Amino acid sequence: MKNRRLLDTVAGLTRLMETPAPDEETILKSSCQLMASLVAHDDWLPDALAKPHPDYYTQYLLYGDPLERFSLVSFVWGPGQTTPIHDHTVWGVIAMLRGAELDQHYRRTSEGIVQAGGESRLHQGEVACVSPRIGDIHRVSNAYDDRVSISIHLYGGNIGRIRRSVYNPATGEPKEFVSGYSNDMTPNLWAPAA
Amino acid sequence: MKNRRLLDTVAGLTRLMETPAPDEETILKSSCQLMASLVAHDDWLPDALAKPHPDYYTQYLLYGDPLERFSLVSFVWGPGQTTPIHDHTVWGVIAMLRGAELDQHYRRTSEGIVQAGGESRLHQGEVACVSPRIGDIHRVSNAYDDRVSISIHLYGGNIGRIRRSVYNPATGEPKEFVSGYSNDMTPNLWAPAA
Ligand SMILES: [Fe+3]
Ligand SMILES: [Fe+3]
Ligand SMILES: [Mg+2]
């Protein structure tokens, strides 16, 4: 690794998870601070895990807790790329490392799926949260049509393996999906700083 | 990963470390069982972390506990390769995945460094222990002059970053060394099985 930032974040998160029975609010508060520190400097993400795919957004696992208490992922947005409307089923923290992203929340109603609030824009260095408690359905997009954006996501589980849903924007109908990960190799957090 | 073996081992070790104040004997006993299971099948180590170096033995980090309670390393021996006489300063478990290795223990005396017991041979599937308590100084070699051997090592710390010693075989004089790791990328334990 280029420096200790990712290691320090992962160590802080592991310590947090080992606290006896922390509640979601405590976890989110401490996690947000750790994630804000992580994206305060854009000098640590290995190039291999910052590479966009030409056709769709990419998610690279940076670190997976062996006991599946959390996962840390880099979301790499090519120009103009966007997610479907989807949920997570676990709490999450989104921290903007490079560029900017647009975040539109939704809620399910008897008539289908409707926008909840306006679109918010997450700027470099900013942090946002999702959870089943505070609103779990959204669509995220690269705010730029002409450059890559990268956000670092933390989830309260193995997000690439969780069965969750994407929603048909017209009918609101959910469809199960499992997102997976795009990478076979993760950073050696203990490799020497360059 | 090709299957769940490495993930299951790392998860078991993490659970073990989170047991309140386990003593070294308990840790070694449980670790030995986990490591024996890991090397019972040679079908999981990614090729990139099984590659020998032509000139010296190689150590690839497979997983590093963020709180530095343990590290799991693949030691890849080219034909005829050997370590210097060295110590570890932490407990360790050696589990033979492929081929065989020779293990000669030493102890320090007022006259220098002398062999402690005979040379032992570790066969595929076998497990051995080191620790400051049970004998921490040894030299390890590939048992074969004509093929690669690979052992999987578990240590009670960040072995690549610990300041420890190599010993001059003639004088017994210690010299500080830090072994490091040969790889910048470690396996994604959550990648799908091939
Ligand atoms: Fe999301
Ligand atoms: Fe050794
Ligand atoms: Mg020989």
Image (cartoon, coloured by chain):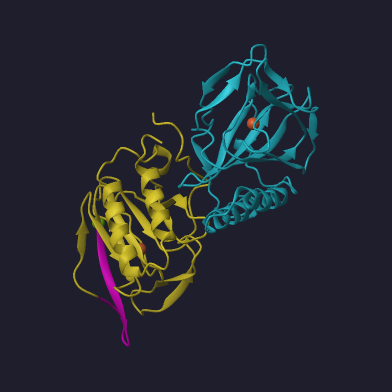
Chain colours: A cyan, B yellow
A10 on left or right of B89: right
**Residue positioned 46% across, 47% down in the render:** A66
Q: Looking at the image, which residue sits at the far front?
A: A110
Q: Quadrant of residue B21?
A: bottom left
Is A51 located above or below residue B175 in the figure? above
Q: Main secondary structure of the magenta part?
A: strand
Residue B56 makes an appearance in the image = no
Residue A81 position within the rendered picture, expressed as x and y whole percent measured from the top left: 70, 22
Q: Is residue B134 magenta?
A: no
Quadrant containing ligand 3: bottom left
Is B139 drawn above or below residue A116 in the view shown?
below
Nearer the observer, B106 or B187: B187
User: Do we see residue B108 in this rendering?
Assistant: yes
Q: Quadrant of residue B31?
A: bottom left
Q: Is residue B111 magenta?
A: yes
Please give the name of the residue rendered at 28% of the width and 62% of the height, measured from the top-left corner: B29
Q: Position of residue B104 (x, y in %)?
A: 25, 67
Spot the residue most to the bottom: B110
- Residue A36 image offset from top left, x and y in percent: 72, 49
List x then y, in percent, for residue A163. Answer: 50, 28
Task: Please indicate whether residue B165 sits to the left or right of residue A186 in the image.
Answer: left
How many badges with numbers are in the image?
0
Q: Is residue B181 left or right of residue A110?
A: left
Which stretch is magenta? B102-115
Tell which of B189 and A136 is nearer to you. A136
